[in-house]
Image: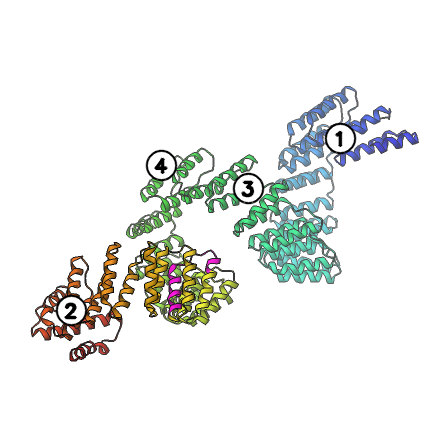
Amino acid sequence: MQLWQLFLWMTGFKASAVACNTILNALVEEGESKHVWLFLRESLARKFPLDVTTCNILLNSLCTKGEFRIAEDMLQKMKSCRLSNSVTYNTILHWYVKKGRFKDALCVLEDMERNSVESDVYTYNIMINKLCKVKRSARAFLLLKRMRNDNLTPDECTYNTLINGFFSEGKMNHARYVFNHMLRETLVPTVATYTTMIDGYCRNGRTDKALSVLSEMEISGVMPSELTYSALLNGYCKLSMLGPALDLIKDLNSRGIAINRTMYTILIDGFCQVGEISIAKQILRSMLEDGIDPDVITYSALINGMCRMAKLHETNEILSRMQKSGILPNDVLYTTLICYYCKAGYVKEALKHFVDIYRRGLVANPVIHNALLCAFYREGMITEAEHFRQYMSRMKISFDSVSFNFMIDSYCHRGNIVEAFSVYDNMVRYGHSSNVCTYENLLRGLCQGGHLEQAKQFVFCLLDIPSAIDEKTFDALLLGICKYGTLDEALDLCEKMMMMEKGLVPDTVAYTCLLNGLIDEGQVKAASYVFQEIICKEGLYADCVAYNSLMKGYLKGGKLNTMKRVISDMNKNEVYPNTASYNILMHGYVKKGQFSRSFYLYKDMVRKGIRPNNVTYRLLILGLSECGMIDLGVKLLEKMVLEGIFPDKLAFDILITAFSEKSKMHNALQLFNSMKWLHMSPSSKTYSAMINGLIRKKCFDKSHEVLLEMLQRGLQPNHIHYIALINAKFRVGDIDGAFRLKEEMKALGLVPAEVADSSIIRGLCRCGKLEEAVIVFSSMMRSGMVPTVATFTTLMHCLCKQSNIADALHLKGLMESCRLKVDVVSYNVLITGLCNKKCISDALDLYEEMKSKGLLPNITTYVTLTGAMYATDRMQVGEKLLEDIEERGLIPSKHPGSLERRMEDAIRRLNLIRNCRKGIHVKEAEELPLESCQQLKSH
C-alpha cells in the first residue's frame, strides 16, 4: 500500500473509477479485507472518482466475511443515496442463498419490487441454483411463476438447473416434467440440457431412460458431445454394467468418435469397482497405446481399486509409473493410500507416504493424521501413538470422533480410566458428539478396572442422554459383572434391562455373557439350561460365539462326547463352526490324549475351507510333543510359517521344553535362537527347561549364560536353577564355581543367606567333602544362621555313611534345639545308620520316638528295620514291628507260619511295593532284597 502511495505521489497519477474498482475487486478475491478498507480510505482522501460498482464490491467484501448486518446497513445507505441497482441486490441475494437464509433472500426480492429495481434472469437463477443445491427443487420451481409475473422468461440455464436439482433428489418424473415444460415454452434443448437429462437418469440407475433420451437427442438433430457419452458410460459403470459400457466404447470407435481421457478413467474406475484390476490395467495400457496420457485422477481410480482389493503391493508399480510420467500424487490420492495402508495394519508404509507428502511440498490433511493416529492405537504402538498425538496437538490439527474413541479405548485397555475420561471431556469440549461406541469403551474400561459400582452409576447417567444406550452398552456392563461381580448381579441387570422404559431386551450377546459367567462359576448345567431354554427357544439366534462358550464349559468338565454333539447341532442349525469351534474340540482331544483324532479334525478343517490359526497349530504341536514326536512338531511349525501364520511364543515354549526334557539341547537351542531372531521373549518356563536340559548335558557354562540372559530380560530366575547349577558344579569338582554361584544367588536376593549356604553344604556332602561341609556348617551356626532341614539331613547321611553315628545323633539334637522339625527322612537316615552298625535296639527306639511324635514311618523305614532284624536274627523283637506293618495294610494280617517265614514274606512284599513305586520291573526285583538279607545273615 505504501508503494502504491509513493507511485501516485511521484507520477502525479489520478486513477479512474475503473482502475480503483479493479484493484478493490482483486483485493476482495484474494481475501485481503483489511487492505480493501485502507485502499478505500486512501482513494477517498485523494478524491478519486468512485461509483456504484465500488459500493457493490465493498458489499461483496462484507458478505464474504459474513458481516450481514453491516452489509444490510450499507444497502440501506445505498438505497437512500439511490445508488443501488440489480447488481447490488444480486450480490446480497447470492450470499443469503449460499448461507441458507432463504427468508431473507425472499425479502430482498420483495424489496427490489418495492424500490422498482428490476429483477433479471440472473437474479432468479441465483435463487434457483442455490435452492436446488440444498435439495429444495420444488420451491425453486415455484419461482418460475414469479419470473413470469415479472415478465421474465426463464433461459436454458434456469431449466437445466431445475432438471439437475430434481434428479439429485431422485425425482425423475419431476425432472421430465420440467423438460417437457421447457419444450412447451418453445425453448430448444441444447446438448447441455440433453446431457443433464442423460446424466440424471444414469445417476438414478435408469440407463434405459438415458438411452431413450439419447435417441430423442439424435432425432432432434442435436449432436451428443463427449460429456454426453461420458455421462452414459459413467451410468453403466456405476451400475456395474460393464458389458454395455464396453459395447458403447466399441460403437464410438466404429463411428470414429475418439475416446478421451475422461471416458478411459470412468471405464478403469468401473472395472476397479467390481475388483477386475487386471482388466483395468489392460485399459490403462490401451489408453497409453492410443496416445492419451492418464492424469492423476486416472491413476487414482486404479490405485483406489487396488487398495479396495487389498493389492497394496501393486500400488508401488503405479506410483513409480506416475513419477516417471511427471505426474505427482495429489491430496486425495495420498489420503486413499495412507487410509488403506493404515486399515491393513501397514503403518510403516503409511508413514513413508506421510513423509513423502511433505517432501513434495504438500500438507497432509486432518483425515490422514487421524487415520495414522488410529492405526498406531489399533496396532498396539502406544508410544508412537502418544508421540503422534502430541505432534498433532502442537500443529493444531483437530482430532475426529474416531480418533477420540481410539484414544479412550486405548486408555481403557491399559487400565488408565482417569485418562480415558479426561480424553472424553476434551472430546465434548471440542464439540465432537459422543456415540454408543464411546460410552461402550468407557463402560468396558470401568468394568475391566473392577469399578463395577461406578460402571452402574455411569449407565444410569447415560439413560438421560438420547441414543446413548443400546443393547451393546448393557452387554459391556454385563460382561464386566460376569467377570468381576456375581451371577446374582448379572441376573439382576438382565431383569432391569427388560423393565426399563426404553424396553431393552437382552440379546444373544447378553445371554452369551451370562453363559460365560455360569461356566466360570462351574455351573455348566445352568449354562446349558440358559442356552437350550432361553437362547434357542426365545426367538434369539444362537450364533457361533454362543455355541463356542457352551463348548468351553463342556471342555472344562471333560465332556468330550457332549462337545461333539454340540458341533453336530451347529451344523444342523446351519451355524457353521469356525476356527475357534474346532480349536475347542481339538483341545478336548489333546487333553484326553486322543492325538490321532485331533489330526483328523485338522484335516476336516482344511477340507471345509476353515483356515487354521496359531492356536490350532499350537494344539497339534502340543499333541505331537506329548507323543514324543517332537521332530514332527518342528515340521508343523515350519508348515505354519510357510502358510503365513505367525507362530506365537507358546508354540516355541512347548517344543523347547520337550527337547530340553529329552536332553536334545542342539534342537532346543536352535528354536531358542529363532525366538530371539523373531523378537519373541521366551517365558520363565522355557528358560527353566533350557537351564535344566543344559545341566543334564553338563553344559554348565551355557546354562549359566542362559540364566544371565533371563535376568537381562527382566525375568526373575528361580533359586532352584541356581541350586541345580551349584550341585552340578560340585559333581564335576568345580567348587570355586559353585561358591561364585552361591554369592550371585545371594546378591540377587533370590533366597535368604541360610538357604544359599545350605545349598553349599549339601553340595560339598554329595561330592564327599565332609570336612569342608562341616566347616561351612559351623560357620553358619556361629553367625546365627539356621541351616535347612534338608541340610541337616544331608550332613547326617554323610556322617552315617562314615559310621559316625554319634555325631549324626548330635546333629539331630542340634536340629531340635534350633526348633526344626525332624522329619521322616531324617529319622530314616539315622535308623539306616544304626541298622548298618547293627544297633537294632537304638534303631527301634528312634522308630518308637518317631511314632510318638505323630510321624508315620514309610516303606523305607519298614524295609530297613525288617531287613536288619532278619539279617541279625533279632526276629523276636520284630513281632511288634510286623503288627504295625499289618495295621498299615502293607502286608496281610494273621499270616500263618513261623515268625521267620512271616518276616521273609514281609521283606519280600515291602521291597515289591518300593520297587513298583520306583518303576523297577517286578520280575527283576522279586528275589533280590531277600537274597541280600540272607547274605548279610551269613556274614
Give the alpha-carbon distance from disc 3 to disc 4, as whole Å. Answer: 32 Å
Question: Is the N terminus in the top left, top right, bottom left or bottom right quadrant?
Answer: top right
Q: Which residue is mark 2?
A: 840
Q: Could you tell which of marks 4 and 1 lies nearer the N-terminus? A: 1
Label 1 Cα crowd, 10 Å radius (few <14 / some 14-19 / many 20+): few
The kind of residue tagged 4 is Met
Tag 4 secondary structure:
helix
For the record, the magenta segment spans 710-730
Q: Which residue is mark 4?
A: 499
Q: Mark 4 or 1, which is nearer the eye?
A: 1
Label 3 Cα crowd, 10 Å radius (few <14 / some 14-19 / many 20+): some
Marks 2 & 3, CB-CB < 8 Å contact: no
Q: Is residue 214 left or right of residue 603?
A: right
In the rendered structure, find residue 34 and report the number of the disc placed on it. Answer: 1
Task: Please name the residue shown 83% across and 34% down the image.
Answer: 22
Tag 2 secondary structure:
helix
Q: Mark 2 or 4, which is nearer the eye?
A: 2
In the rendered structure, find residue 401 and report the number of the disc placed on it. Answer: 3
The kind of residue tagged 1 is Lys
Q: Could you tell which of marks 2 and 3 lies nearer the N-terminus? A: 3
Residue 718 position by quadrant = bottom left
Q: Nearer the viewer, residue 892 or 458?
A: 892
